[in-house]
Amino acid sequence: MLTGVQVLLLGGDARQLEVIRKLTELDAAVTAAGFDQLHTPLDGAVQADYADDLFDGVDAIVLPPVGTDDDGRITAVFSDRELVLSGMQLARVPKHCVVYAGMAKPYLRELCEQYGIRLVELFDRDDVAIYNSIPTAEGAVMMAIQNTDITIHGSNCMVLGIGRTGLTLARTLQGLGAKVKTGVRREEHFARAHEMGFEPFYLSQLVQHAANIDLLFNTIPTMIVTAQIIANLPSRAVIIDLASKPGGTDFRFAEKRGIKALLAPGLPGIVAPKTAGRIIADCLSRLIMEDTNKRGNGQ
Ligand code: NAP
């Protein structure tokens, strides 16, 4: 339980409603700001206007999946007011306070470092990334269906990178009956892809494998689907780039060649905000509980 733990939750979207639900179920004292336009009451949480004194004495600050922007602004889809995190506010929190966000931009990292506040980036964690890969793969399939006139069953798919997202996606496509090629750079990934019934190839040979592809999914966060690769794709091919912005595709060249190429960020929050919220909530509540127990044990 989180009885007696003071949590300040700032901004976010529908995913944070799941976080609030979970934390209040566990009896944390949750104050939430950035929800003034939400027309339903927040289960068990205190709804407050954003103000400096909200930071006094809090044990945890929960920020949205993208913590803040480069100027400290916190996204709050349920509010039209501006929420900005500044040093003045972090100076008010106790030293044991932890800041949780899905991911942090340099602004947030530097601010936390400056004030000696521990920052936890949840999307860095393997467990969260693997759970998140499920709605991501479903979202990628949704985009593929929306942007093609063929079935995924029987199609020639290519997945670049078989990390946490790529592996789930490749397996999902295979489950739908697609022929799946996977581009890897490591021998052990080649072996794993072979074992799982994909058709692996080394990324150094990507250009040779580009012909006859219907759907190309990229999960590699570096320029990999270059003009040379796009030039070798059939004109019917659709590229769905899942890698974090700016993606790994030469979008300019794809447009020039008339190949549909889509950057698809933030799919879990789009296609399954409830599930995505639960993934964050489960991990977050476990971590806050661990931190609270450590403090209780004087660690
Ligand atoms: P991951 O587990 O680290 O997997 C990344 C894959 O890319 C690995 O197979 C890695 O191979 C490969 N890779 C990385 N750099 C490479 C390079 N320079 N050359 C060749 N291969 C390279 O990451 P993930 O969790 O799957 O996430 C992948 C991307 O998707 C990230 O950008 C993440 O932010 C994004 N993402 C997007 C969504 C969405 O909704 N669109 C959702 C979740 C994640 P090695 O193992 O050999 O390094």
Image: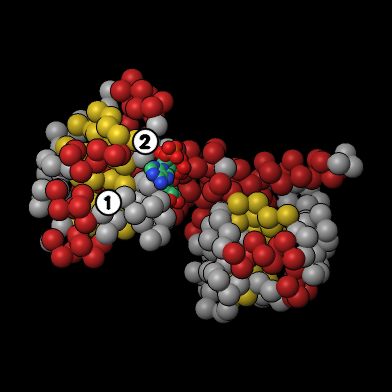
* Neighbours of disc 1 within 10 Å: few (<14), some (14-19), many (20+): many
Q: Are marks 1 and 2 in contact (CB under 8 Å)?
A: no
Q: How is the image coloured?
A: secondary structure
Looking at this rendering, what residue extends furthest in the bottom direction?
81
**Closest to the observer, 226 or 219:** 226
Q: Secondary structure at mark 1?
A: loop
**Disc marking residue 225:** 1
Looking at this rendering, what residue extends furthest in the top direction?
195
Q: Is residue 20 visible?
A: no
Looking at the rendered image, the quarter that the N terminus falls into is top right
Callout 2, which amino acid? Arg
Q: Is residue 92 left or right of residue 155?
A: right
Q: Is residue 144 left or right of residue 266?
A: left
* Neighbours of disc 2 within 10 Å: few (<14), some (14-19), many (20+): some
Quadrant of ligand 1 in image: top left
Tell me the quarter of the picture where residue 165 sits.
top left
Q: Tell me residue 214's x, y (percent).
A: 15, 44
Q: Secondary structure at mark 2?
A: loop
Q: Tell me residue 64's x, y (percent).
A: 56, 60
Looking at the rendered image, the quarter that the C terminus falls into is top right
Tell me the quarter of the picture where residue 114 sits.
bottom right
**Closest to the observer, 238 or 205:** 205
Q: Tell me residue 6's x, y (percent).
A: 77, 57
Callout 1, which amino acid? Val
> Which is nearer the N-term, disc 1 or disc 2?
2
**Disc marking residue 185:** 2
